Image (spheres, helix red, strand yellow):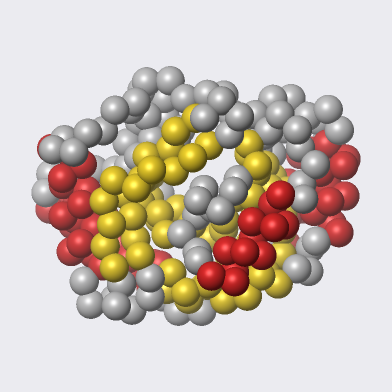
């Protein structure tokens, strides 16, 4: 399983030292929150994630709800307000995702523990198989074969997680966030079976983030 101990220690230190960062509403061309490939948990695991996220006392920040909770596979492009059906790059993403998912079984990821980091709070993911790694690699190859590179340009993800909250303004009381995370460091959400990969668009609602599915491919 991935070791989050160092990640958690760095996150605690950053918040307690006043080095928190925060997001702002998306603007055209921004490098964050662009279209991405993700997988979303469901069932009892999703219920537990959503219930715990809702208990974070972070008014004014982006605390994520059921439809927003996800595992990011790849960030694909800078932010665009409109990605309509028929968009040629969106069609490439859909075809590449279908090719990448073909023949792969659903990914199984145990979600256990929470951790602060400079920009928010995550639930820590521990893959029980190699599906996420294989799917990510296959998607990159399928996109490159179609002449499209994603925004990550060779970055290798060595940790998997579900973001429960992103900070959207300077923190009034970072210690409270750290103490909340410390109190839930041992929480076990269970094993998520991720059976659908999606290309999604993130949209700012004014009070938080919602996730719109653009394309999807089943793992079966």
How many tags in the picture? 0
Residue 181 vs residue 127: left or right? right
Where, quadrant-wise, is the N terminus in this rendering?
Answer: bottom right
Residue 14 vs residue 130: left or right? right
Q: Is residue 48 above or below residue 75?
A: below
Q: Is residue 150 visible?
A: yes
Q: Residue at x 42, y 30 (%)?
A: 31
Image location (x, y in percent) of residue 130: 41, 75
Q: Is residue 103 above or below residue 115?
A: below
> Camera-side residue: 212 or 136?
212
Where residue 44 sits, quadrant-wise, is bottom right
Residue 96 vs residue 48: left or right? left
Q: Is residue 192 above or below residue 73?
A: below
Image location (x, y in percent) of residue 153: 33, 43
Image location (x, y in percent) of residue 160: 53, 60
Residue 118 vs residue 140: left or right? right
Image location (x, y in percent) of residue 163: 59, 50
Q: Is residue 140 above or below residue 41?
A: above
Where, quadrant-wise, is the C terminus in this rendering?
Answer: bottom left
Q: Is residue 158 visible?
A: no
């Amino acid at each position: 399983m991935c070791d989050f101990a160092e990640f958690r220690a760095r996150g605690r230190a950053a918040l307690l030292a006043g080095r928190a960062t925060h997001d702002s509403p998306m603007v055209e061309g921004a490098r964050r929150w662009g279209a991405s490939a993700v997988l979303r948990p469901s069932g009892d695991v999703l219920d537990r994630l959503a219930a715990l996220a809702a208990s974070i006392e972070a008014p004014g920040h982006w605390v994520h709800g059921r439809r927003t909770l996800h595992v990011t596979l790849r960030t694909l492009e800078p932010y665009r307000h409109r990605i309509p059906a028929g968009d040629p790059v969106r069609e490439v993403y859909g075809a590449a995702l279908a090719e990448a998912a073909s023949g792969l079984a659903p990914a199984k990821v145990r979600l256990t523990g929470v951790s602060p980091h400079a920009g928010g709070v995550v639930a820590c993911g521990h893959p029980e198989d190699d599906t996420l790694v294989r799917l990510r690699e296959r998607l990159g190859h399928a996109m490159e074969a179609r002449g499209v590179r994603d925004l990550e340009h060779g970055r290798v993800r060595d940790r998997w997680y579900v973001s429960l909250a992103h900070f959207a303004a300077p923190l009034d009381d970072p210690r409270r966030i750290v103490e909340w995370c410390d109190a839930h460091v041992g929480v076990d959400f269970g094993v998520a079976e991720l059976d659908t990969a999606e290309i999604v668009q993130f949209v700012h609602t004014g009070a938080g983030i919602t996730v719109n599915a653009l394309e999807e491919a089943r793992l079966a």
